[in-house]
């Protein structure tokens, strides 16, 4: 028996996709989770929107022109991309693939169209849908974000309800009532996913083959 077969090597990392309707608090939950679980690697997205005050290139986003973004798509460098409120957002492919291969878990915090595209190429990912505690609460969050007119609020609510209908494609649903509780649930999901028989079994097969 060689040492390769009697220790469990570091397995491939898990891709976690955290998504949900606009206004549900994905960004807040993801930021809190990164503090609580610094070993989860955050994938920095590319976007064509302008930086907001305090946002740093390569930390919050990779800020691109529309032409640059188009080139990344054509070069197949995007794992997924989507157009959201007039801007493009996308996940650089290479970083995600290399980090998973190195055995680290990677989290994507993305809107629903992009999440569904990831599912087509990364079905083994863990897809988590964040829900508001109620539709009234979602409306409050949308309203307190800015000075939108009633018409804009109605149209955002209707988009949010369409987005919620897509939750059937996800593995888990978490109600974002308290950020700490939502993060603890994501950590629990990850712990359980690492113990899935099919993730552990290939290594045990190596043990068995090494003995027989
Ligand atoms: P914001 O402009 O507020 O930073 O982000 C707007 C929306 O884009 C959020 O719902 C956020 O989750 C989503 N988003 C951020 N990065 C990506 C990405 O790489 N791909 C997709 N599909 N959506 C993203």
Image (tube, helix red, strand yellow):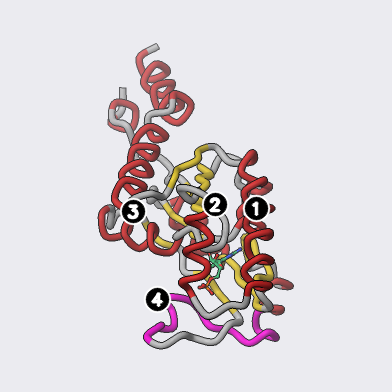
146 relative to 124, above or below: below
Q: Which residue is mark 4?
A: 59
Q: Earlier in the sequence, mark 3 or mark 4?
A: 4
Q: Which mark is residue 179?
A: 3
Q: Position of residue 185 (x, y in %)?
A: 36, 41
Q: Which-is-in-front pick, marks 3 and 1?
A: 1
Looking at the image, which residue is at 38% across and 63% down?
28
Q: Position of residue 55 (x, y in %)?
A: 41, 83
Q: Which-is-in-front pick, marks 1 and 4?
A: 1
Q: Which residue is mark 2?
A: 135
Whole-angstrom CA distance, mark 1 to mark 4, is 31 Å
Looking at the image, which residue is at 62% across and 69% down?
153
Residue farthest toward the front in the current orientation of the protein? 150
164 relative to 6, above or below: below
Q: Quadrant of the C terminus?
A: top left
Front residue of this view, candidates 131 and 150: 150
Label 4: state its secondary structure: loop
6 relative to 132, above or below: above
Q: Which residue is mark 1?
A: 161
Count residues near mark 3 (Cα–Cα under 10 Å), then give few for <14, some for 14-19, many for 20+: some
Residues rendered magenta in the picture? 54-69
Whole-angstrom CA distance, mark 2 to mark 4, is 32 Å
In this rendering, the count of numbered labels is: 4
């Amino acid at each position: 028996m060689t040492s390769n077969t009697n220790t469990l090597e570091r397995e491939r990392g898990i891709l976690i996709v955290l998504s949900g309707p606009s206004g549900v608090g994905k960004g807040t939950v993801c930021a809190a989770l990164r503090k609580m679980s610094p070993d989860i690697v955050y994938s920095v997205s590319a976007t064509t929107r302008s930086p907001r005050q305090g946002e740093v290139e390569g930390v919050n986003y990779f800020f691109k022109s529309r032409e640059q973004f188009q080139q990344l798509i054509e070069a197949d460098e995007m794992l997924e991309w989507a157009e959201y409120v007039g801007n493009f957002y996308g996940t650089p492919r290479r970083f995600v693939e290399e980090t998973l291969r190195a055995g680290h878990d990677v989290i994507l915090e993305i809107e629903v169209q992009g999440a569904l595209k990831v599912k087509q190429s990364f079905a083994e990912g863990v897809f988590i849908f964040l829900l508001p505690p109620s539709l009234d609460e979602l409306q409050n969050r949308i309203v307190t974000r800015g000075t939108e007119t009633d018409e804009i609020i109605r149209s955002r609510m209707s988009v949010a309800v369409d987005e919620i209908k897509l939750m059937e494609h996800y593995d888990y649903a978490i109600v974002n009532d308290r950020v700490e509780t939502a993060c603890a649930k994501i950590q629990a999901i990850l712990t359980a996913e690492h113990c899935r028989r099919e993730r552990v079994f290939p290594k045990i097969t190596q043990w068995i083959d090494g003995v027989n």
